[in-house]
């Protein structure tokens, strides 16, 4: 469960970071397009020939993200346009590119939102024209999502493979941890049943706390076996030491009990001694 939550957190964070990177890449592409448009428009203004701008604008028509691109002179007359019919006409009076002295953007709503980027064309420190380009917001978002999903597909593949490896590793580590504990439980059961010769196997190459625990358990079992053997030797010794004098007492009591000159009380006491030795 913890690994699953960590994976979701990682994927979510990665998605946010990659989405931000894709948006910044799209903005960088827009800025690059605007700079190239400014360059060709500046060249056309200096040469008083719009062919360079017209050729570049024609190339921009192949980009689905660009709704239109305009290059105009300082009077607002269109030198190049993605719509050839607009060439020679003038920019609308409310066009922000006419009075712009620095780059800017404005979002136009409608059925299809268009982000208009505009800016001046400067020649020797003076405004020699204006550029304007409209970017389809929907297409831009679609391109960002396409790029992002391409990255996410690879990410998910790597994530699932990594997750599978991690889970297999977790199972292996869990078994490595639980196997010695299982062996310890079996050893405790064997010793509890009286099998003091049982030794818990120690895995070779292991040097962690569980190995130390198994070794201590085996030392404890060996000590229990020594104590048990000591008890057996003690019982055998004390039994022998008690049996010899008791047998002697029993034998002499039998001799006395066979004496014909015993009184009734003497016979009774001798019988009590004999029974006690038994």
Image (cartoon, rainbow, N blue to C red):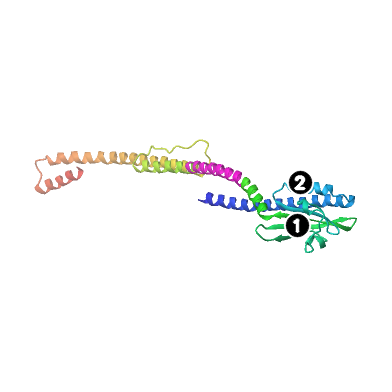
Q: Position of residue 26 (x, y in %)?
A: 70, 51
Tell me if residue 77 comes above or below residue 52 in the rendering: below
- The residue tagged 1 is 117
Residue at position x 32%, y 39% in the image: 237
Q: 109 or 150: which is nearer to us? A: 109
Q: Quadrant of the C terminus?
A: top left
Residue at position x 75%, y 48% in the image: 60
Disc number placed over residue 59 in the picture, else none: 2
Q: Residue furthest top?
A: 204
Residue at position x 83%, y 47% in the image: 52
Tell me if residue 120 comes above or below residue 221 in the rendering: below
Q: 231 or 212: which is nearer to us? A: 212
Q: Position of residue 115 (x, y in %)?
A: 71, 57
User: On the image, which quarter does residue 105 sit in?
Assistant: bottom right
Q: Which residues are magenta?
A: 152-175
Assess disc 1: are there few (<14), some (14-19) or many (≥20) residues with their C-alpha within 10 Å of its C-alpha: many
Q: Residue furthest front?
A: 85
């Amino acid at each position: 469960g913890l690994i699953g939550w960590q994976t979701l957190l990682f994927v979510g964070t990665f998605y946010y970071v990659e989405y931000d990177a894709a948006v910044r890449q799209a903005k960088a592409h827009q800025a690059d397009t605007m700079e190239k448009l400014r360059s060709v428009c500046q060249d056309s203004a200096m040469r008083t020939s719009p062919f360079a701008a017209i050729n570049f604008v024609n190339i921009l028509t192949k980009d689905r993200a660009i709704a239109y691109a305009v290059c105009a002179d300082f009077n607002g007359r269109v030198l190049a346009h993605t719509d050839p019919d607009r060439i020679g006409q003038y920019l609308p009076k409310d066009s922000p590119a006419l009075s712009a002295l620095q780059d800017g953007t404005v979002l136009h709503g409608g059925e299809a939102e268009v982000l208009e980027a505009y800016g001046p064309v400067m020649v020797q420190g003076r405004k020699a024209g204006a550029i304007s380009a409209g970017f389809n917001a929907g297409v831009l978002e679609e391109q960002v999502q396409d790029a992002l999903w391409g990255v996410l597909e690879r990410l998910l593949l790597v994530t699932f493979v990594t997750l599978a490896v991690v889970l297999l590793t977790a199972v292996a580590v869990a078994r490595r941890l639980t196997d010695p504990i299982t062996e310890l439980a079996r050893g405790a059961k064997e010793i509890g049943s009286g099998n003091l010769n049982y030794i818990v196997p120690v895995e070779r190459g292991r040097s962690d706390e569980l190995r130390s625990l198994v070794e201590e358990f085996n030392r404890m079992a060996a000590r229990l076996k020594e104590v048990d053997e000591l008890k057996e030797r003690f019982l055998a010794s004390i039994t022998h030491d008690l049996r010899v004098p008791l047998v002697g007492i029993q034998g002499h009591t039998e001799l006395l009990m066979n004496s014909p000159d015993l009184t009734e009380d003497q016979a009774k006491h001798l019988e009590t001694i004999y029974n006690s030795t038994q």
